[in-house]
Every structure is written in structure tokens, then in C-alpha cells.
Image (tube, rainbow, N blue to C red):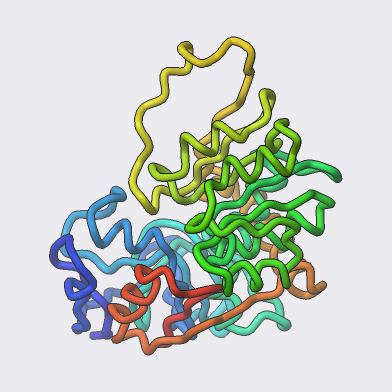
């Protein structure tokens, strides 16, 4: 028996219950991991409220963890007990002390990355890596708009965009958060509660708009994001914190534009093992080199995961939240 957070019904943070679960021996192709730290992501909020597809209830949420291998299933010959590994993928179930996970979906944790740092940067940093270099390859001089720029993923996107030579526009909800993202290298910190961000972007770009928008908000930002997007720009919608936007009638768009739209997915971009290993290794290299500075703003004991969800939903947090078993 191990302890875990179990979701029995969709709803508020109170639905996250700390209880014991049965854990069988790892199946063929699996490893059993004892978590040292677990990442907290907006996706888990979506799973909790039923906004994202997940397993049948009841289930253990969570998509990111770092720890040590404590047992091997049959056929696993490239890992050994005692190896430190991380993962940032489905199947969900990281909100627990110990779990089984497919061995070929793990990746090694280098010595310079401790468990807490790994849990704070795997999903977020790897998302920044594939979005800014694979979905739309950011080039020096590009104008990049990043929504929720002070959040865990947003702040990593800001840093990487700056490293790649972009002119960075970021939206935040407060002056304090604006100061924070400026310290990370954001050129234009826009407080969306004080001004319309699209108007601000268009004014700053002399009406040209930005080359790419990375949008994790969705419904409340999507239309204005399109309004300030260059006529040959790319729209990357990787989250729907405010809900999904209205369906887009692509053939009804202005024929003077030829914009590209993508719904990025970390799981698609890491489906092939070589891509998983490459994206994880590059992310950890960025942390080692100081390109991405990991900011763990708060840690919570795993049994208090509901409090972590409340903190994220308050929109008062910056950086990453980490759960400790």
C-alpha cells in the first residue's frame, strides 16, 4: 500500500483526497519509481474539473515526476535499481509516493538536476523547447508574444525566446508580475488588466503585429491574439486556462492573411523515444547553462495538493510549484 492523491469526482480542489492505494509489481516493460518530487501543472487542474480527457474515475492525477528506480519489470534491461529518472508524459498518475511507469517513457536525470528542479522544469521547460524550436522556430529579430508570461511555462518561454534573439512581448495580470518578467529578459511587459494587449502590441510594432503567439489562456485571449498576429504569423494554442475559444472558420478569414494555426502537444513531440531524450537533454542543458533559470516559488507536501491547486487558480503565483511526497 502506498499513499496517493485520488480524484473520485470532478470539481473543486476538495475532490483531491489523500488515501492509500494498492500498487502491484511493475508489469513487463515498466519500472517502479519512488518519487522525490512531483510537478504541478495547469493540466492537472483541467483533469480535476473534467476539462481534459483522463482515465475513468477514480484515478490518481499528475503527469510529471522525478525519483529513483526501486524495481524493474520483465524486459527492462537499460535501467537498474537506483537509477535517477524523470518523466513528463501520460499515463497520468504522478500524485503518489511510488508508482509504476513505462520504462521507455523515462529519461535520465543528470547530476546537476536535483529532483525538485526536475519536477519544476520538465513539462514546462520541455514545452518551451519544442514550441519555440519545433512548432515555430524562433529566429533572431522575431517578435514573440507569450501569454501568462509570469507562470511556470510562460517564464521559461520568455527566457528561451530571449536566448534565441527574439523581441519578447509578455502579458501578465499585475505590475509586480510585469517587473518579474522584465527581470527575465522580457522587452515589453503588458499588464492586460490595465490595457488591451492587442492594441499595445500593434502600437509597439507599428501595426505589423508579432510573428508568433504562444497562448495558454484560450477563450479570453484568442481573438485579440489573432488581431495582433502578423499576416504570415503563427498561432500556437497550447492551453485553455479560460476555456476553449470559439470554433474558427478558417475559410472565412481575411484572404489578405495566410496565418498558421497549431495546437501543440508535448506528448506528440516526444512520442518517438529519440525526440523525448533529445528534448529532455536540451532542457537540462539550458538549466545548466543558465539559459533557463528555474524559479520554484512554492513547495507543498503532496497530501496538501488541494492547496497547491488553490494557489495556482488564484493566479497570484509566479514560477513553478512542486509537490513533495
- Residue 279 found in image quarter: bottom right
Q: Where is residue 177 in the image (x, y as percent from the top left)?
A: 58, 70
Left-right relation of 282 to 223: right
Q: Is 82 located above or below residue 132 in the figure? A: below
Q: Is 236 located above or below residue 251 in the figure? A: below
Residue 70 in view, yes or no? no
Q: Position of residue 129 (x, y in %)?
A: 67, 54
* Residue furthest left in the image: 9
Residue 61 in view, yes or no? yes
Of residue 315 and residue 208, the one placed in the foreground of this image is: 208
Of residue 30 and residue 91, the one placed in the foreground of this image is: 91
Q: Residue at x 78, y 50 (%)?
A: 167
Q: Is 132 located above or below residue 66 in the figure? A: above
Of residue 194 and residue 125, the one placed in the foreground of this image is: 194
Q: Quadrant of the C terminus?
A: bottom left
Q: Where is residue 309 in the image (x, y as percent from the top left)?
A: 33, 73
Q: Residue at x 55, y 71 (%)?
A: 86
- Residue 162 found in image quarter: bottom right
Amino acid at each position: 500500500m502506498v499513499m496517493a492523491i485520488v480524484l473520485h469526482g470532478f470539481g473543486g480542489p476538495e475532490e483531491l483526497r489523500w488515501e492509500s492505494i494498492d500498487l502491484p509489481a511493475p508489469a513487463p516493460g515498466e519500472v517502479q519509481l519512488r518519487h522525490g518530487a512531483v510537478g504541478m501543472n495547469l493540466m492537472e487542474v483541467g483533469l480535476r474539473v473534467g476539462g481534459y480527457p483522463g482515465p475513468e474515475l477514480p484515478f490518481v492525477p499528475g503527469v510529471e515526476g522525478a525519483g529513483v528506480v526501486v524495481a524493474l519489470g520483465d524486459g527492462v534491461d537499460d535501467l537498474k535499481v537506483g537509477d535517477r529518472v524523470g518523466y513528463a508524459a501520460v499515463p497520468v498518475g504522478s500524485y503518489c509516493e511510488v508508482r509504476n511507469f513505462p520504462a521507455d517513457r523515462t529519461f535520465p536525470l543528470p547530476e546537476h538536476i536535483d529532483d525538485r528542479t526536475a519536477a519544476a522544469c520538465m513539462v514546462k521547460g520541455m514545452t518551451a523547447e519544442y514550441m519555440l524550436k519545433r512548432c515555430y522556430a524562433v529566429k533572431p529579430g522575431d517578435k514573440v508574444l507569450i501569454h501568462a508570461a509570469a507562470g511556470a511555462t510562460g517564464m521559461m518561454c520568455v527566457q528561451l525566446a530571449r536566448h534565441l534573439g527574439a523581441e519578447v512581448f509578455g502579458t501578465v495580470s499585475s505590475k509586480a508580475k510585469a517587473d518579474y518578467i522584465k527581470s527575465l529578459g522580457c522587452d515589453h511587459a503588458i499588464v492586460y488588466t490595465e490595457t488591451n494587449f492587442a492594441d499595445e502590441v500593434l502600437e509597439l510594432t507599428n501595426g505589423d503585429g508579432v510573428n508568433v503567439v504562444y497562448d495558454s489562456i484560450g477563450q479570453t485571449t484568442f481573438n485579440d491574439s489573432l488581431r495582433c498576429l502578423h499576416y504570415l504569423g503563427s498561432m500556437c494554442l497550447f492551453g485553455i486556462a479560460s476555456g476553449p475559444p470559439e470554433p474558427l472558420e478558417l475559410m472565412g478569414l481575411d484572404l489578405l492573411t495566410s496565418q498558421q494555426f497549431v495546437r501543440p502537444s508535448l506528448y506528440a513531440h516526444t512520442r518517438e523515444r529519440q525526440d523525448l531524450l533529445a528534448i529532455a537533454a536540451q532542457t537540462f542543458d539550458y538549466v545548466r547553462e543558465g539559459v533557463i533559470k528555474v524559479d520554484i516559488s512554492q513547495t507543498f507536501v503532496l497530501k496538501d495538493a488541494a492547496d497547491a491547486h488553490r494557489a495556482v487558480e488564484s493566479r497570484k503565483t509566479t514560477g513553478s510549484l512542486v509537490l513533495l511526497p
